[in-house]
Image (cartoon, rainbow, N blue to C red):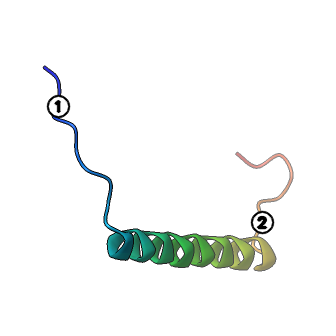
Amino acid sequence: MSSPATAPPAPNNLKRIVAASLIGTTIEWYDFFLHCDSGQQRPAGAE
């Protein structure tokens, strides 16, 4: 079963995709920073 070829996204949609990706990545990095900076780390040897 092969899927039909699809056309690349239009320039307007491409800008929207890139913007959404950038915003999502920024939020993820910010969340990662907050988690690492919160000081709620497991003690050594805790599983």
Q: Along the horizontal axis of the image, is 36 left or right of 7? A: right
Q: How dense is the environment of label 1, judged by Cα within 10 Å: few (below 14), some, or many (20 and up)?
A: few
Quadrant where the image shows the N terminus:
top left
Give the residue drawn at x 83%, y 58%: 43
Query: For the residues carrying marks 1 and 2, which lies nearer the camera in this image?
Result: 1
* Name of the residue lying farthest toward the right: 44
Q: Are marks 1 and 2 in contact (CB under 8 Å)?
A: no
Q: Quadrant of residue 26?
A: bottom right
Instruction: Tell me the tag on residue 3.
Output: 1
Spatial CA distance of label 1 from label 2 is 47 Å
User: N-terminal of the two: label 1 or label 2?
Assistant: 1
| Amino acid found under the numbered disc labelled 2 | Gln
For label 2, the residue is: 41
Q: Position of residue 40 (x, y in %)?
A: 75, 73
Give the residue drawn at x 56%, y 74%: 22
- Between 6 and 38, the one lying in front of the other is 6
Q: Secondary structure at mark 2?
A: loop
| Amino acid found under the numbered disc labelled 1 | Ser
Instruction: Tell me the tag on residue 13.
Output: none
- Between 11 and 24, the one lying in front of the other is 11
* Name of the residue lying farthest toward the top: 1
Count every numbered label the image shows and give the total. 2
Relative vertical location of residue 42 with respect to residue 33 in this rendering, above or below: above
Q: How dense is the environment of label 2, judged by Cα within 10 Å: few (below 14), some, or many (20 and up)?
A: few
Q: Along the horizontal axis of the image, is 26 left or right of 19? A: right
Q: Position of residue 37 (x, y in %)?
A: 80, 78
Relative vertical location of residue 23 with respect to residue 44 in this rendering, above or below: below
- Between 31 and 5, the one lying in front of the other is 5
Give the residue drawn at x 32%, y 60%: 9
Q: Along the horizontal axis of the image, is 26 left or right of 1? A: right
Q: Secondary structure at mark 1?
A: loop
Quadrant where the image shows the C terminus:
top right
